[in-house]
Amino acid sequence: MNLRRALLAAGVVVLVLLFVGGWLLVRPLFDRPSLRLLDYAADAADPASLTVRAERTCGDRIGRAEVVETDDRVEVTVPRTSSDPDAVCAAVYREWAVEVTLDKSLADRPVYDGGCLARGRADATCRLAASPR
């Protein structure tokens, strides 16, 4: 009888630890102040126009894309203004296309996820891949 109680208690402890550990691993995905950017496509007809694909949860409310341009790079951040706690989702993540207009042609400048850089990640990790349009 004592063995059963001990095993039950140990099982409850393991379940609680799994739940808490899982939440700690998943929580940062929902607490990001900006959306995670996946890649971008440049418009051949308008070299100052980009379409950036972002990953968002269905409850995300997003703001206008923020662009920082320098001579050697472009940083795009798509802020999350809030999250709708009452949203009911069939899928956790959705892709979202964000149109961005640059001040000058993209040319050979690389595009970076500004939110990724703001979280202290390395440039190589935050650089977006160009996708064919």
Image (cartoon, helix red, strand yellow):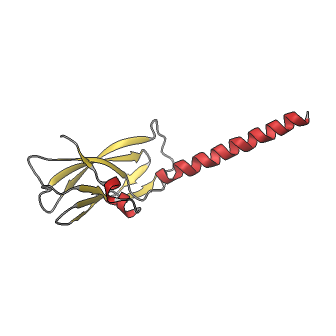
Q: Is residue 21 left or right of residue 65?
A: right
Q: Position of residue 103 (x, y in %)?
A: 15, 63
As drawn, which residue projects farthest toward the left?
45
Q: Quadrant of residue 48?
A: bottom left
Relative vertical location of residue 103 with respect to residue 9 in this rendering, above or below: below
Nearest the viewer among 65 and 84 is 65
Image quadrant where one finds the N terminus: top right
Looking at the image, residue 4 lies above or below residue 109: above
Q: Position of residue 22 (x, y in %)?
A: 58, 45
Direction bottom: furthest residue:
70
Which residue corresponds to the image point at 14% horizontal and 55% vertical from the top-left? Answer: 108
Q: Which quadrant of the rendered structure holds the C terminus?
A: top left
Left/right placement of residue 38 relative to residue 8 reads left
Residue 5 coordinates in the image, percent (x, y): 86, 37
Q: How many marks?
A: 0
Q: In the image, is 8 to the left or to the right of 115? A: right
List the single residue furthest toward the right.
1
User: Which residue is depicted at the point 32% across and 59% down?
Assistant: 123
**Picture residue at 42% right of the left edge, 59% below the top:** 33
Residue 68, compared with residue 36, is above or below; it is below
Depth check, front residue: 6 or 40: 6
- Say left or right for 79 vs 59: left
- In the rendered image, residue 59, in percent from the top left (x then y), is placed at 44, 47
Q: Nearer the viewer, residue 55 or 3?
A: 3
